[in-house]
Amino acid sequence: MWSNVIHLINEKRRFILTTHTNPDLDALGSEIALDEYLRSLGKEVSILNSDSVPGAFRFVDPERRLRTFSPGRHRETIREAEVIFVIDASGGWDRIGRVGNALADAQATVVCIDHHPDPVDFAHVALVDPDAAATAELIFKLITQAGGVITPTIARALYLAILTDTGSFRFPKTSPETHRIAARLIEAGADPAQLYKQVYEQYPLERVRLKGYVLNSLRAEADGQMVWCALDQATLKAYGVAPADLDGFPGLGMEIGGVRVSVLCVEMPKGRVKVSLRSDGSVAINGLATELGGGGHPSAAGATVEGDLAQVTAQVVAGVKVLLTTGQSRRCPATVP
Ligand code: AMP
Ligand code: MN
Ligand code: MN
């Protein structure tokens, strides 16, 4: 499975790593780990992302390896790149955002390493395993198959990625292999207590208060099988929290017994709504996310949709209701719930 990629790594010298918009810690941790490994081989590596690192995740990059793409500054880097690694993102160049447009025209070989079950026809080489709980599991396998050493930096970055993408080892894709890899990362220098604290116990007071607001605003539908919340820009501004800092909020409704699907809709600038869907695994919600122009995993998916917050929320809530009663994913007309 890995020999093509290992061959490319050995043969080529200039690499670009990139990931999806609104990057999470699986995306960023996987990039940092692969960057560290490639640099240990003496390669030239640039990590170019469309979005800057959300405030809550800055600790993951003390050496400031992650760069926000700028067309003027990075044109030459893209022109000279021999291999582009697209990490934790399939579905097409759009998913990568602004830098995706620039990379789509590059001459380099494109390698996609991911665990999303979305199309990968934009890549020359695709290493996709939808059973992996995090892309970081695949990066771990690549590095170890290639004979690389898991340094403490790699161990920390990959552990953070797995910790967060598995919802602290509880989401359905968490497997014995996930735990075996986590064990190896701990042996290589990842400190579970310290890393957990860094991710989950360093929030500003405003974000914790906003969490209280979201919990208070949850609305139940379909006999309590679904809960949803719509967050508008005014509320986000009043609490002083950016949309990029809402990681974990979509799943808050899953704490309630009987809930199969939890929905969070967040009003974004420029008339768009970021839809996040979470499921307990009894119903796959990525079909609905794809209908809405996004994608994702059966139990965690999302989309960014043009439109008004109330209308989009109504459409999504109606779609989830259909899903819960028929198991069919359908884009529904909006009826205000
Ligand atoms: P989120 O709700 O933003 O935390 O996203 C949950 C999952 O849904 C992500 O891990 C992605 O797999 C997927 N996802 C979210 N937004 C999009 C999108 N616009 N396009 C494709 N997949 C998405
Ligand atoms: Mn991700
Ligand atoms: Mn992931």
Image (tube, rainbow, N blue to C red):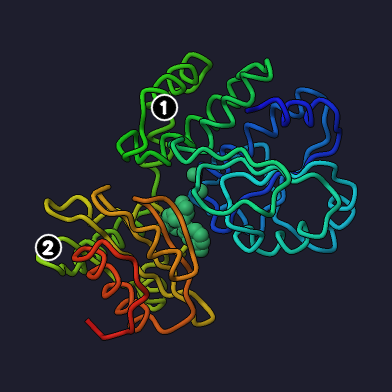
Residue 226, x across and y down, in percent: 20, 63
- Few, some or many C-alpha atoms within 10 Å of disc 2 (few <14, some 14-19, many ≥20)? some
The amino acid type found where label 1 is placed reads: Thr
Residue 81, x across and y down, in percent: 85, 45
Report the front residue among 55 and 331.
331
- The picture quadrant where one finds residue 329 is bottom left
Question: From the viewer's perspective, is 107 left or right of 16?
Answer: right
Instruction: Name the secondary structure under disc 2.
Output: helix
Q: CA distance from mark 2 to mark 1?
A: 32 Å
Q: Is residue 250 above or below residue 86?
A: below
Quadrant where the C terminus sits is bottom left
Image disc number at residue 178: 1
Question: From the viewer's perspective, is 139 left or right of 260?
Answer: right
- The picture quadrant where one finds residue 99 is bottom right
| Any part of residue 245 in sight | no
Marks 2/1 in contact by CB < 8 Å: the verdict is no
Image disc number at residue 224: 2
Residue 225, x across and y down, in percent: 15, 60
Q: Earlier in the sequence, mark 2 or mark 1?
A: 1
Q: Residue at x 45, y 83 (%)?
A: 307
Residue 161, x across and y down, in percent: 49, 37
Q: Residue at x 53, y 28 (%)?
A: 156
Q: Residue at x 34, y 33 (%)?
A: 169
- Few, some or many C-alpha atoms within 10 Å of disc 1 (few <14, some 14-19, many ≥20)? some
Report the front residue among 4 and 178.
4
